């Protein structure tokens, strides 16, 4: 599963009502980078775009 797919697939469960759901984007990327240090890094602006999308701003 790609990092993008994981971002969309992870259910916030009981934390769904909390603000800043989009932070999952950065957390997933950090985990993927840790597991695969050779993985191509995502541009910072792209990370913010993904966060905004998950927050419902895109």
Image: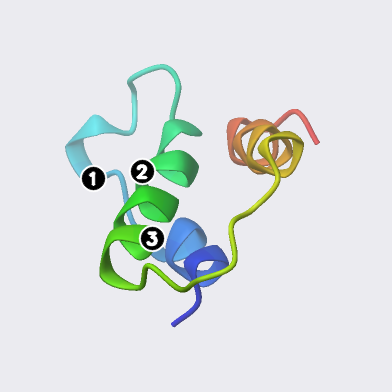
Earlier-in-chain disc, 2 versus 3: 2
Query: Mark 2 near mark 3, Cβ–Cβ under 8 Å?
Result: no
Vertical side of 48 occupied by 5: above or below: below
Question: Which residue is drawn at the image coordinates 30% and 44% (left, top)?
Answer: 12
**Residue 56 placed where, x, y %?**
68, 33
**Which quarter of the picture shows residue 58?**
top right
Q: Which residue is mark 1?
A: 13
State the residue lying farthest toward the right.
58
Nearer the observer: mark 2 or 1; the answer is 2
State the residue lying farthest toward the front.
38
Question: Which residue is drawn at the image coordinates 60% and 30% (left, top)?
Answer: 55
Q: Which mark is residue 33?
A: 3
Q: Which mark is residue 27?
A: 2
Color encoding of the figure? rainbow
Quadrant where the N terminus is found in the figure: bottom left
Q: Secondary structure at mark 2?
A: helix
Q: Which mark is residue 36?
A: none
Number of on-image labels: 3
**Residue 11 placed where, x, y %?**
32, 54
**Residue 17 placed where, x, y %?**
34, 24
Category of crowding for the residue at label 3, using alpha-carbon neighbours closer than 10 angstroms: few (below 14), some (14–19), many (at least 20) = some
**Residue 2 placed where, x, y %?**
50, 76
State the residue lying farthest toward the left.
14
**Which quarter of the picture shows residue 31?**
bottom left
Give the camera-side residue of 37 and 51. Answer: 37
Q: CA distance from mark 2 to mark 3?
A: 10 Å
In the shown orientation, is residue 33 left or right of residue 50?
Answer: left
Category of crowding for the residue at label 2, using alpha-carbon neighbours closer than 10 angstroms: few (below 14), some (14–19), many (at least 20) = few
Nearer the observer: mark 2 or 3; the answer is 3
């Amino acid at each position: 599963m790609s990092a993008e797919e994981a971002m969309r697939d992870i259910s916030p469960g009981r934390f769904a009502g909390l603000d800043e759901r989009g932070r999952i984007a950065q957390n997933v990327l950090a985990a993927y980078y840790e597991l695969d240090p050779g993985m191509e890094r995502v541009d910072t602006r792209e990370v913010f775009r993904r966060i905004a999308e998950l927050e419902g701003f895109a």
